Image: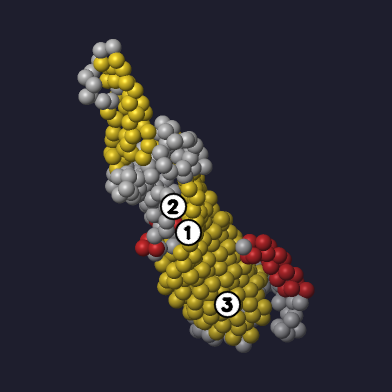
Amino acid sequence: MPINRTSSRIAIALLTTFLAYPAFGQGPLGMQLFAPADTSTYGGGNPPNEGYFFAFDGLFWSIPAPRKALIGTTGYREVATNVIQHINGPQSQEPVTVTYAQTSTLHTDDLQAEFQAGQRFEFGRVEDNNGWLVSIFRLGPSSQKVSANNVDVLLGDEIDPNTGHGLLYGLIGRGILVSGTDSWIIGKWDNLPVTFDQATIHDKVDTWGVEASYLRRSHTFHNGGNVELFLGARYFEFNEVFIVHGYGGVLDDNTYWKTSGDNHIVGPQIGGRYFKQQGRWTFSTEGRFMAGFNMQNTVQQGEFGYLGSPNSIMKPEAWQGSAYSHRETVNEFSPLVELRVEAKYMITRAVTFKAGWTGFWVDGIARPNDMIVYQVPDMGISTANNRQSVFVNGVTVGFEINR
């Protein structure tokens, strides 16, 4: 993403601009970056600074885990795993297969909410209580990995009316029947289980956003507080990649499916901020609301591997694996609500240290772990489960110049 490569350069460029042009648009005294802090309370306190401003926040935010989903479809399927051999039995008593009802045994419960580091840059200008504000943030990317052994994955397998069985059908084994001095080797075919010796889940999340607003600041109240109102537009992305690899069993080590859900959300935004100075301290609360239009793109790629040949034991008889690719595009309404609380400490008149908390909730997010159609030979994407809520929140620590 461009924001990932250029965020540090933006910060350096903006700081250089502030230091090189301290008087630009602000009168003879300029910013006075190192002037003593004015903590006077006369007449309701010192009025807020005007002119250009810049702020940087280091983020430590939590990205929530997706809701629980099975790796595989629901229900069960009768499958066979072995052949019982009959010794000294009658010729009519053929060897029989050992069967069980296979279900999906792995789910995404082990994926947890994770705290990730990020950055937020804000800059703009206020003059005569009017101005503009631009805010850019990036969080992550986060990455989780979960592994499990002896994993059953139930896959839908449509029955072919011509053969009477599905693709996951093959030779379970060859049983021996001995009757008197005669013996027979009898092959047994049945439904094959999809059981991986080991399966790994990889889940990756990357999120960032940018907003631009017109800013209107009130005159200082008698109690020393001020209100700023915002009106503008916002763009927000929440992108997730969900990958499963299966190793060993009926399907070989080339088996994997990778499903990505990209959420591109844009819309108008309104907001407000109340702040009040008390000595060197300033306390503020602000909120934003965006009516977001979400252009969801979900892409799936994968492969069912196969190692074997016709009549190989515990391998599909007629199906030799497959590769596939799917794409779905859906538009959704995704409202976003953000809340910030913050405390600042003035080091000089124009430079402050700050710390706070930010949280935002957004609905209508496509998260791919719950959008997979588990079937052979080509899996699939379900758009019925493309709306999850996401609540991202955590602490912020940074500095601000001339606001």
- Marks 3 and 2: which is nearer the front? 2
- The three-letter code of the residue at mark 1 reads His
Residue 55 falls left or right of residue 206: right
- The three-letter code of the residue at mark 2 reads Asp
Q: Is residue 214 visible?
A: yes
Q: Nearer the viewer, residue 209 or 222?
A: 209
At 61% from the left and 71% from the top, the residue drawn is 122
At 55% from the left and 68% from the top, the residue drawn is 209
Label 2: element kind: loop
219 w.r.t. 209: above or below: below
The numbered dot on residue 378 is: 2
Whole-number angstrom distance, CA of label 3 to CA of label 1: 35 Å
Residue 126 falls left or right of residue 226: right
Seen from this angle, which residue lies furthest bottom?
128
Residue 394 falls left or right of residue 2: left
Q: Nearer the viewer, residue 289 or 224?
A: 289
Q: Is residue 29 visible?
A: no
Residue behind mark 1: 326
Q: Nearer the viewer, residue 177 or 213?
A: 177
Whole-percent x, y for residue 392 in the image: 47, 61
Instruction: Indicate the quadrant containing the N terminus: top left, top right, bottom left or bottom right.
Output: bottom right
